[in-house]
């Protein structure tokens, strides 16, 4: 698997932000260990970064690499969601990622 670059936008310690961060931390420590760079941005502390990325809701996870860029907005609560929506080798797909173009780009601009 090519090195993955992820950026997670959260809003403080909201329940959805905590759940998203927990899911990603678990993925980074297991299936993605050594294969991922994760940056966490709290939009309350760094609103200019959220504006640059045109973040309209949190949590938002952006997979910047490998290309194409993909975004997941909202429900980041399970490994299966990460695997399905961002084509990451985690969760119930046996560690093999699909790249069939079916991941949703819910925020527009860059599938």
Image (spheres, grey):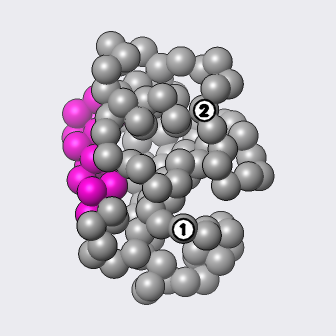
Q: Nearer the viewer, residue 50 or 103?
A: 103
The quadrant holding residue 79 is top left
Q: Which residue is at 40% across, 25% downward?
A: 89
Residue 99 horizontal/vertical position (percent): 60, 20
**Residue 26 is a magenta residue:** yes
> Is the residue 81 above or below the residue 16 in the image?
above
Residue 107 horizontal/vertical position (percent): 67, 55
> Is the residue 88 above or below the residue 24 in the image?
above
Q: Which residues are magenta?
A: 18-33
Q: Is residue 106 visible?
A: yes
Residue 26 horizontal/vertical position (percent): 23, 43
Magenta stretch: dominant secondary structure: helix
Task: Determine whether label 1 and label 2 are within 8 Å by CB.
Answer: no
Q: Nearer the viewer, residue 58 or 40?
A: 58
Q: Name the element at disc 2.
A: loop
- State left or right for residue 67 relative to residue 12: right
- State left or right for residue 94 relative to residue 98: left
Q: Is residue 64 visible?
A: no
- State left or right for residue 68 relative to residue 90: right
The quadrant holding residue 42 is bottom left
The quadrant holding residue 83 is top left
Q: Which residue is at 69% across, 37% downward?
A: 68
- State left or right for residue 82 relative to residue 32: right
Q: How many marks?
A: 2
Crowding around mark 1 (Cα neighbors within 10 Å: few <14, some 14 to 19, many 20+) is: some
Residue located beneath label 1 in the image: 57
Crowding around mark 2 (Cα neighbors within 10 Å: few <14, some 14 to 19, many 20+) is: some
Q: Earlier in the sequence, mark 1 or mark 2?
A: 1
Q: Which residue is at 40% across, 42% downward?
A: 36
Residue 103: give its label. 2
């Amino acid at each position: 698997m090519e090195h993955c670059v992820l950026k997670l936008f959260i809003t403080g310690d909201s329940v959805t932000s905590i759940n998203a961060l927990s899911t990603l931390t678990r993925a980074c420590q297991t299936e993605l260990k050594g294969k991922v760079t994760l940056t966490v941005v709290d939009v309350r502390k760094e609103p200019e970064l959220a504006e640059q990325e045109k973040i309209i809701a949190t949590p938002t996870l952006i997979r910047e690499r490998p290309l194409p860029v993909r975004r997941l907005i909202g429900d980041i609560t399970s490994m299966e969601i990460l695997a399905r929506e961002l084509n990451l080798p985690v969760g119930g797909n046996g560690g093999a990622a699909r790249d069939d173009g079916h991941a949703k780009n819910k925020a527009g601009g860059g599938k």
